[in-house]
Amino acid sequence: MEEYDGMLPKRPAVTEKRVKIAILDTGIDLENGYISSKRGRIKCWPSKQECRDTDGHGTHVAYLLLRLTKHVELRIAKINSSQSFTGTKVKLLAEKIAKVSTLFLPSRLTESTGLWIKSLAL
């Protein structure tokens, strides 16, 4: 078996830096069974209460990222209560993207709500 050790992928050390992913969506349900078991890898902005997900979409996105990646930290910002955006909230979205980008310094940012209009603000 030792002859194959060099061919097997090495497991990352526990101390390796995790990738920060900012999720701008409908929030997160921290009471979800799987997600609650990963609370140490999740931070909400501006607060946990303000990030409460009443739609479910943001929770599902967070669940998938936590489930599929081991070395990730999620930064959650609720930008809307549903998956669709109206023109009046586009400026708020642009402001939150800028704030989260400077506050969390994420490696990646995901925003998956529906935007039905063109906007120069983004």
Image (cartoon, rainbow, N blue to C red):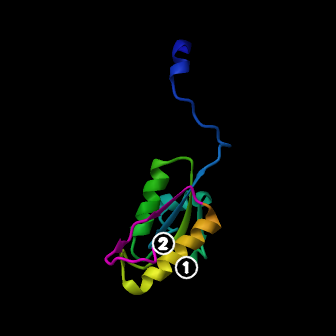
Q: Residue furthest top?
A: 3
Magenta region: 106-122
**Residue 110 position within the rendered picture, expressed as x and y whole percent measured from the top left:** 46, 62
Image spot of residue 56 (x, y percent): 40, 70
Q: Quadrant of residue 96?
A: bottom right
Q: Amino acid at mark 1?
A: Glu
Which quarter of the image is occupied by the C terminus? bottom left
Q: Nearer the viewer, residue 87 or 43?
A: 87
Q: Outermost residue toward the right?
A: 15
Neighbourhood count class around disc 1 (C-alpha, 10 Å): few under 14, some 14–19, many 20 upward? some
Label 2: state its secondary structure: loop
Q: Residue at x 38, y 71 (%)?
A: 113
Distance between mark 2 and mark 1 Cα atoms? 8 Å
Q: Which residue is mark 1?
A: 50
Of the residues shown, which amino acid type is indicated by label 2? Answer: Gly
Q: Secondary structure at mark 1?
A: helix
Residue on which the image places disc 2: 27
Quarter-of-image position of residue 83:
bottom left
Evaluate if marks 2 and 1 touch, with contact meaning CB atoms under 8 Å apart: yes
